[in-house]
Structure formats: structure tokens, C-alpha cells
Amino acid sequence: MNKPTQIIPSDQFAAMAAQAAADAVSVSDARGQIEWANEAFARITGHPVDDLMGCHSAEILQGPETDRETLAAIERARAERRAIVTDILQYRADGSTYWAELHMTPVFDNQGAAIHFVTIQRDVTHRKRREVETADLIQREKHRETERQLLSQVSEWLYSAKSLEELLLVARKAMSTLIPEAEGSLYIYSESRDTLEVASAWGDNRSIDSVDPDACWALRRGRAYNFGTRAIEFACDHVGTEDHPFFCLPIVADGETIGMLHLRFTSFSLKSMDRKMLDIFINHRWNLSLLCAEQMSLAIANVRLRQVLLEKSVRDPLTNLWNRRWLVDTTNKMLAQARTGDGQLSLISIDIDHFKAFNDTFGHEAGDVVLRKSAEVMVDVARDRGAVCRAGGEEFVVLCPGMGGPQAVGLANEIREGLSALRLSSEGNRLSQITASAGVATYSRGNTASDLLRASDAALYRAKHLGRNRVVNAADLDETDDEPPPKA
């Protein structure tokens, strides 16, 4: 015969369940003072159960980092006698923190009055940590995406730069935006390659104006160098002994080191930063800086190639003078400036007299010698006063900005006299004396580049008509002087 089952009151079952629960359970009165708590509450918070009686949970569990708005929301729910579910940062007895998922529910008597509140707290610190890590990962990914977009924009701007000056402007803006924590300098080798001169700087810059290549570990070792994270490392001499992380990254174009990108993190001292955080920070900025240095290297190589091609397109290969294309483009630019101001502009057209005779008598090599040496004389005489161009054949033009007609006539005569003083030989043969005829034209309002060239040519033709080896000013011509003479 089975024994009758012992009947246990339901409130005892509730007490047994609450006591055995893994979550912290407490019962407080209407004012929030604790009347009962289970063992899990004591285990999670570190406060003995007996010490909790009569205490308000907020007084023993809140701390300086507990969200005040969350605490206020809990107290409003208690005052309004309603349930609330929220996450809150709380403090244990030893001062350590934990995240709790808090459920607070009112208990009503038969008359509907709230006489108690049952609070269940579950430790969700691990969940919160994962949420924070996930949020941090998302934020870092957003930051990396922003950096990728900025790098793409920087790359586009760098490759669009037509000159080194434009490129330096883009580089300064790009580095200030991508790595705002660092002050920086971009150094370029001097022509003598015995030092690097600062070409651009940004941030609260305290870098020196020039760097000896031997004073930089990156340049001496031939690879990028970062200081600030290694157990064994040495500061570059051009930086000194400051206890700040810095990067030195060589800039290489067409296989040649042409400069160095230097970044210094003066606001991040090794002594004041946590080592782990510093390593993460430096590693990220290091990778970003390597990408920037690579982009700058490629962009500088692109600019140099563009400048070489441009130079070839506007230079005469025999004399290395500017060619007719450069002459027309530059004359148009200078005319535009003259139209908006009171600036003067003159052109001198010069033609070597009887040039065909040099080729017929002594050969084309002799003709080339005459052209090259004549070009050297013109450049030397016109230095700082005019730009010498080879318009074609034995014809030259000197572009003289800021110069009026009389001064241009004087310069043309100096050139003519300098050419007459030349004594040349080719392949052992003494060449005939060189003489030249020249025509001068000066800008007047309404003139175009074609007008000036036509006027200077007309003056040149008149000089030929008058017996050569002379200078004629277009301002002295009348309408009957426009007929060109036979070429000789």
C-alpha cells in the first residue's frame, strides 16, 4: 500500500525555487528596502545576506559609473508601481563591476496596493562584453571603410597632380586628415643629394628644415623604420632623444630614393600610454603610413614622368631651347596678364644671316654647331631678361616680359654683337663669322600672339632688306615695309 504523498504548501515551493535559483533574487518593501535575498544575491554581489536586510539596493550596488538615467528609470517604475526590465552596471562589495539584467516586478495585496517588489538580477557581464566587442568591431570596420574611402580619394588627387607643388599640397592635406594625431614633414633630396630639405610640413610641427641622410635609420638601412614599440630600438639623430613614437618612411620613385616621409606622435608619450593600447595604435598608424608613403612614391614617379614628357614636348632637342609650342602658349598667358594690368611685353625675332651657306659649304654638322653655339650666346646674354626659343630652322624668338620696345631693341643688339664675336670651327674647318638680323615688336592693347609674331617677323624682314646684321623696331615701320624679302 502506497504511503500518502506529503502536501507541501506552494509558498514553500516558491521559497525553495528562489533559494536554489542561479539568479540573484531579492524582495523589497514599497520603499525599496531589502526584506529578503537568496544566496545567489550574496554570491553575485559579495554582500552577506544578513548585511543586506533593511538596505536599499541602490545604496549598496550603485557606483560612479552606474548610469544615473537607468537608476532614475528604476525609481520612477517603483513610484508608479509598475514592472521594469533593464540592463545596469553595478558594483560588488570588493569594488569590481558587473552588468546585470534586472527584472523588477511589483506584488499587490488583495486591495490592489503594491506592498512588495521582487527583483531578479542575472549576471550578463559576458554578454555585455561581447556586445561591446561587437560594437567596437563594427566601429573599427566603419573607421577602416572611411579610411579606405579617404585613401581612394587621396590616390585620385595625387595622380591628378600635374606638378610637385600640387602633389605636396595634396599630401599635406591627406596626412592631416588620415593621421591627425601626428605632426609630419615630407623631405626631398637636394640636387647635390647630400641632404634632404623639407618640402612640406603639417600639424604642430617641430621638425628641422633639413636632414643628413646618415642621421636617419630608414635612409641608412634602406627601408621604413618606426620607433616606439620595440624592446631594442634607437632614435634617429634628426629626431633626438624625445620619448615619442615616430615613423621614417623612404619615398622611392623609379627605383631611386628621392625623399622621406617623417611622422611624429608628440601627444602620445611612451611613459603615459598603456603598452597594449600603444602597440595597437602604433601598428594601425604604421600600416596606414606605409600605404600613404607608397601612394606618394607612385604619385611622385607619375609627376616626374609627366614633367619629363612635358619638357620633351616643349624643348628643341638640338639646342635645348623652348620650342614654338611653348612660345605660343606662354605668349598667350603673358598677353592675358598684360591685358588686365599695365604690364609690357616684347618679342625679338632673330634670324642667322646666310645660314644656308654654312650647310652648303661646311655640311649639316657645321650648321648644327652654329645653331647650338648661337643658342648658348642668346641664353647667356638674355639671362633674367628674356626666354629664348627656337621657332624653327635658323629662326629664334626671345620673349621679354616687362620690357618695352627700346629696352628690347637694346637686348637684340647685345645678342647680335655676341653672335658676331663667336669664332667657331667644325671638323677642323674654321667657320665664317656669324651675323644675325632681328626684329622687335611690343604689345599694344588688342594685340594677339599672332599679331606680335607677325609684327616682329615684319621688322626682321625689314632688317634683312636693309642689309642684314641689324635690328629694326616694328614701331618704326610704315605700311609699305610689310613685304618679306627673299630668304637667304
Image: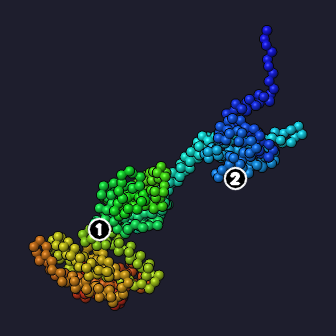
Residue under the image location 29 percent in, 68 percent down: 191
Report the residue that reaches farthest toward the left.
Answer: 428
Q: Quadrant of residue 233?
A: bottom left
Note whether 95 is above or below 397 in the view shown.
above
Q: Which residue is mark 1?
A: 191
What residue would you read off at disc 2?
Answer: 68
Quarter holding residue 209: bottom left
For mark 2, does the 10 Å Cα neighbourhood hold few (<14), some (14 to 19), or many (20 or more) residues?
Answer: few
Identify which amino acid the numbered label 2 is placed on: Arg
Question: Is residue 132 left or right of 480 when viewed as pictured?
Answer: right
* Amino acid type for the residue under numbered disc 1: Glu
One can see residue 375 in this view: yes
Given residues 44 and 191, the one toward you in this image is: 44
Q: Position of residue 412 (x, y in %)?
A: 28, 85
Q: Residue at x 69, y 52 (%)?
A: 68
Q: Secondary structure under badge 1? A: loop
Q: Position of residue 322 (x, y in %)?
A: 31, 72
Point 47% across, 65% down: residue: 203
* For residue 298, side relative to residue 417 (left or right): right
